[in-house]
Each structure stands twice: as C-alpha cells, then as structure tokens.
Amino acid sequence: MLRSMAIRMKEWGLLAYPRQTVHLPLNSLNDWGRTGRVLGQGVQEIGHGLVGLAPVIAQVAQAGQRAETAAMLREIGEETAEELLALPVRDWDYSWQQSYQPRVQHMLNQLSGEEREQAQRMSDAYSRRYSLEGRRRMELQRIRQARGRWQEQVDNAVQNGDEAAACHWMEQGRNVFVPESEMPRELGAVRRRSLYAGWQQRLQQEPYAALIAWQADDARKPEDADTLKRLEGDMEHTRQTLYKNLALQLAADVEQGREPGAVLLERAVAAGVLPGEQMPAQGQTETTMSVADTCNWLRRIDEREPGQDERLMVDIALAPIPQEQRRLLLQRLQSTGTLPPQQRVAVSRTLWNWYQEGRFGCPGDEESLLSLGRLQEEALIRMTTETQKTTNEWLESVGKDADAWLCFEG
C-alpha cells in the first residue's frame, strides 16, 4: 500500500500545477451587504413617503367626491325649480321641500356613510340657494304675467277705440309698470292710438256715418300731424271704395229697371262720396236724347281715360234720360271695357275729327250727326268682332269714301 501511494505521489509530482479555481473576493460580499442596507433604507423611505401622502390622497378624493356631489345637487336644484315654475304654486317653501327632498334622498341612498353625511350637509346649502333662485324666478314670472295681463287690457281698450278705458288702465299701471316720468308720453300715445282706432272701427262698421261725422265741425280729430294725415288718407280711401260700390249699385238698379233711391244719394252727398254736381236736380224731368246728345255720349264713353269708368257709370245712371237709353249707354260702357284703350280712343277721335272737318256733312246738321252715330255703332261692332288690322282697314275705307262738304251760313 505504501508503494502504490509513493507512485501516485511521484506521478502527481510530475504533473503540471493545477489551474486556479474561481475566486470570489470577500470584499464583494461586503459590497452586497452595503447594497442591501441602501436598498432597505430606500424602501423604508418610500414607505414613510406613502404614509405622508395618505392625507393628501384622501383630500384629493374628498374634493373629487364633493365636486361630483355638487354637480348632482345642482342638477337636482335646477330640475326642482323648473318643475315648480311650471305649476301654480301657492306655498313655495312647502312645494320645494316636497319636490326637492325625495330627489336628494334618492341620491344619498347611493353613497357610503361618510360621503352621505358630507352630501347631506351640502344639500342643505344647495337647497337654500336654488330655492331662493327659483322663488326669484317665480316672482319675476308672476310680474311678467301681471304686466302682460295689464298690457292686454290697455291694448284691448285701444283697439276698441275706448279712450276712457285705455287711460283708466294706464293709471292702474302708474309707478307699477310705467314710471311716473314716462306717464305723460305714454298717456299721449294711448290717446292718439285710441282715437285713431275708434275712427277706424267706425269706418269699418258704419262708413257713411263715419264720413259724415268726420266732416262735422265738432268732430274730434288727432292733434298730431302724422296721425291726422293717416286718418285723412283712410277717409279718402273709404270714399273711393264707397263711390265704386255706389256706381255698381246704381248700374244694377238701371239694369233691373229700378230708379236710384233718394235716401241713398242724399247720404252719399252728405258723406262726400257723391260730388254735388253729380246729384240730379230735384224736380228735373226726363227727356229723350237727341242725335247730338247720343253722339256725344258715345264719344265720351269711347274716349274715356283709365279710372273713369265709375264716374261715367254714375253719370249715366243719374242722367235725366229714359231708363232704356241709360241701359244702352251702360251696355256700351261695359262692352268697350274689354277693348284695348288705345284702339277705341283712336277710332273715336278719327271719326269725330272727320265729322268736324265736314266729311259727313255740315257739322251740327242732323244728317251729319246721323252718319257719325251710325259709324260709331259700326265701329264698336267691328272692334269687338274683328282684328285690329281689319278694323283699321275699314276705317281707312270710310275716310276715302267721305267727301268734304262746304257749309254756308246764310
């Protein structure tokens, strides 16, 4: 056994020195310990920092919760106010509590204990705030409604032309809806409007009576120029409308064989609707138209200017001639109304000029007037049944065939 160990020892001594194994320095172990101490100290400091931040975090959370609670309370307050403003509330405080508290209680039931207490304290303040704002809006709404009802009474009185009632309601609003300093101006405006509306109503309801009253010496008229001018324009417009209606009525009377009513004509003259010169003289008798009168009427009808139809209608209806002749003249007036004005005027003037020139005979002679009248009648037929071109050709042929006459006065 010793022998073999000697060999191994010898053999081992011949071998190279073994390589150095992995070396772990002790100073590194010492660094690990220091690192651990530093890390532990940092964790400890972080722990202490979190503990210090806890009140801040809690404060931030509470602030957020308060903001959310405030938003919900604001919404509840606004909803409650809107609901009560739409109702005829008599006791605001009682109605507010009946509507506000159930909404708040529903919100509180969704919160935890501490949050609920805080929200309850906030709800009291918000309740007072939005209740006061709602009450203020309710009072303003009542004031607006009261002013609206007062203004409605004033306007109704003005529109009815009741100046006394309008002024009465204005006095009710003195220093309430109208400041004292503005009362003279507002009262003056109400009086002017009432007076104007009163005349307007009379014109609509009894136009003849209103026009007669307007012409009276003691008629109460507006003092300011603008209102007076407007009323005078309204009066004139009413006269023109009544005159057109009168003309149509008189023409219808002639067509149906009735004579114009004396009462109607007298009232029309008194109202200024019918000019005095158109009123037939009392006691005048009817006379049959002569040939010259007939030609003059036909010429006047054919050569009338636009807007003269009503005047001619009245003149014909009130002319002191037989009713049948009035009816025929009115028919011609109606027939020529569909013709081009320039054409009928030109044809009539041409025939009249030829008559004056003596082409149909000596002007004023019955034969000459009969020729003129015959051509006036034929001209109407041609203008209503033929084209303007063929009518002009006919008129040219009449002119060529007409001879000039020499008239001597003995």
Image (tube, rainbow, N blue to C red):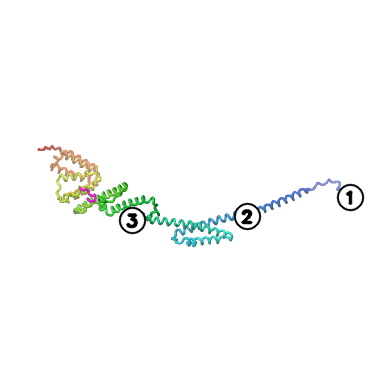
Q: Check residue 275 for magenta coloring.
A: yes
Of 158 and 410, nearer the camera is 158
Q: CB under 8 Å between callouts 2 and 1?
A: no
Of 32 and 367, nearer the camera is 32
Q: Tell me the residue that label 1 is attached to.
A: 6
Q: Which badge, 2 or 1, is on the more N-terminal residue?
A: 1
Q: Tell me the residue that label 3 is attached to.
A: 165
Q: Is 272 positioned to the left or the right of 126 in the image?
A: left
Residue 256 placed where, x, y %? 20, 54
Gap between marks 2 and 1 measured at Cα: 81 Å
Q: Amino acid at mark 1?
A: Ala
Q: Is 336 rendered above or below residue 172?
A: above
Mark 1 vs mark 3: in front: 3
* Secondary element type, mark 2: helix
* Secondary element type, mark 1: helix
Q: Amino acid at mark 3?
A: Ala
Q: Which residues are the magenta region? A: 269-276
Q: Is residue 135 visible?
A: yes
Q: Tell me the residue that label 2 is attached to.
A: 55
* Secondary element type, mark 3: helix
Q: CB under 8 Å between callouts 1 and 3?
A: no
Q: Is 254 positioned to the left or the right of 59 in the image?
A: left
